[in-house]
Amino acid sequence: MGFVENKISSVIELCEDPTPDPAGIIIFGASGDLSFRKLIPSIFKLFKNRKLINFYILGVGRSNLSDKDFRERILETLNFDRDLVKKFIDHVYFLSGNYDDDNLYINLKEKINILNKKHNAKNNRLFYFATPPNVYLPIINHLGKFKLNEENGNFARMIIEKPFGNNLESAKKLDYELHKYLNEKQIYRIDHYLGKETVQNILMMRFANIVFEPIWNYKYIDHVQITVSEDLGVENRIGYFENTGLLRDMFQNHILQLLTLIAIEPPASLEANMIHDEKIKVLKSIRPFEYDTLDEYVIRGQYTDGYINGELKKSYMEEVGKNTNTETFVAVKMFIDNWRWSGVPFYIRSGKRLKKKLSEVSIVFKNVPHSIFSDFYPVKIEPNSLVIRIQPDEGFKLILQAKQPGSKMCINTLNMEFKYRNFFDYEPQDAYERLILDALLGDQTLYVRNDVMEESWKLVTPILQRWENEKSDLYYYPSGSWGPKESYRLIEKDGRRWRDYENI
């Protein structure tokens, strides 16, 4: 028994999150919604789980807040043990100023030096850009001007929030400015979808189980569906969303990153660059969208008023207060032109104010070559599917066919379902918690490399240009539905159908 106990103990120790080196976390835009809703709670959980030692948090923003003001707002936000929260906020500070003012960065440099000594943070710095994208460049240039980007034996890393640019040209410009002062190992382009447990589990499911990999190709897979839906509208993000739209907000980053994990070849190892190398191969293999035939492959929509859970919701145009062509829904049919995926269509849809909040990937396998059960069971047999549920109720489901009990040869669909919460005794880790810890550890695996980012912009640029340069159809759908009827035609004209979510 001693050997078994030692082995189990070693596995548990191996799977524990490591503790990063001492560091200061400097959050630009710290008085904003993202900071209080996601970043501060995630950093607090790292503190609670003893993953932060000798650290400080320095919030930077245009709001005129003192250290005391900032700490009181955090006390109001964090619904945890009061005494533990008070210990946490002893590490928290705030600095006010304008992002294009030299004085802010002079004061910032001085404050960092003081806090490094006070908390023994070793002059390691993790900068988090939680600001609107239009102030990224002024911050980057000032950090470079005052040499806050320099490492000198320590680390200086920057987490950049999406959207990373607004199109290919602006993304390349932003990347160019970053590389004037930083090397690629210092840049962490965050995509919080990659921090979700089930997204990370895609690699484990594919490459740690021999049962899946031999059939993970065009010979056995009929098509792939990706659905990312939200039941909320744009809420308090109207200004941001009007300038972005759903294609930039979801498809260019979250969904394409998810698609690459489904489609990549086995990397040589789990080292970050090995995974990124395989991702870029997938993106380069995606069949480009043709300008003239775009409407055959891309459907865009916008929600009107409608009921969700019995409550009447306003239309997007009512929320914005004007007529607008901004898309709140996108459905896309695309192909990956390589040996593994030759001829396999990927159907993707994402939208706001849809019936339910969920994110799923459905791998739909081909029908059996010949059914020997047709004499007994004249109804068409549902194909096997592997459904990967990202949210909510993270897990996966294998859909098989089995005999229904009784004397007749009747087939019934069997759902073999696994849910994380039913199997693992663990506290769910927020995606930001995972990703901030990785950045402190210097692990870029779940971040987006510059060439991967650029290639994803190349893919969506023809769509954006078509929508901006020519009148393209915008289809409307009622809030609480699954999108415009044209999105159903996109898949049904190929003899397929979207997965039924009505009874989930």
Image: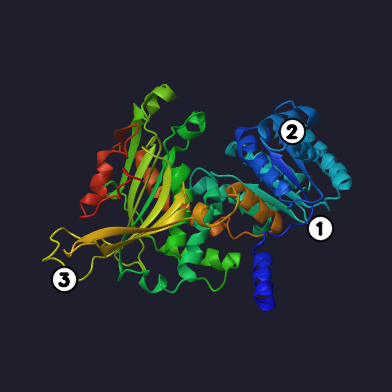
Identify which residue, 180 or 33, lies in the foreground: 33
- In the picture shown, does residue 150 fall above or below 342? above
What amino acid is found at the position of numbered circle 3 in the picture?
Ile
Q: CA distance from mark 2 to mark 3?
A: 76 Å
Which label number is shown at residue 101? Answer: 2
Which label number is shown at residue 152? Answer: 1
What amino acid is found at the position of numbered circle 2 in the picture?
Asp
Q: Residue at x 62, y 52 (%)?
A: 434
Judged by depth in the image, the label closer to the viewer, 3 or 1, is 3
Which label number is shown at residue 372? Answer: 3
Q: CA distance from mark 2 to mark 1?
A: 25 Å
The tag earlier along the polypeptide, 3 or 1, is 1
Tag 2's secondary structure?
loop
Assess whether mark 3 and mark 2 are in contact (beta carbons under 8 angstroms). no
Tag 3's secondary structure?
loop
Q: Residue at x 65, y 44 (%)?
A: 42
Q: Position of residue 486 (x, y in %)?
A: 25, 42
Assess whether mark 1 and mark 3 are in contact (beta carbons under 8 angstroms). no
Q: Residue at x 16, y 67 (%)?
A: 373
What amino acid is found at the position of numbered circle 1 in the picture?
Asn
Identify which residue, 51 or 269, lies in the foreground: 51
The tag earlier along the polypeptide, 2 or 3, is 2
Q: In terms of image quadrants, where is residue 402?
A: bottom left
Q: Position of residue 78 (x, y in %)?
A: 67, 35
- In the picture shown, does residue 6 fall above or below 96? below
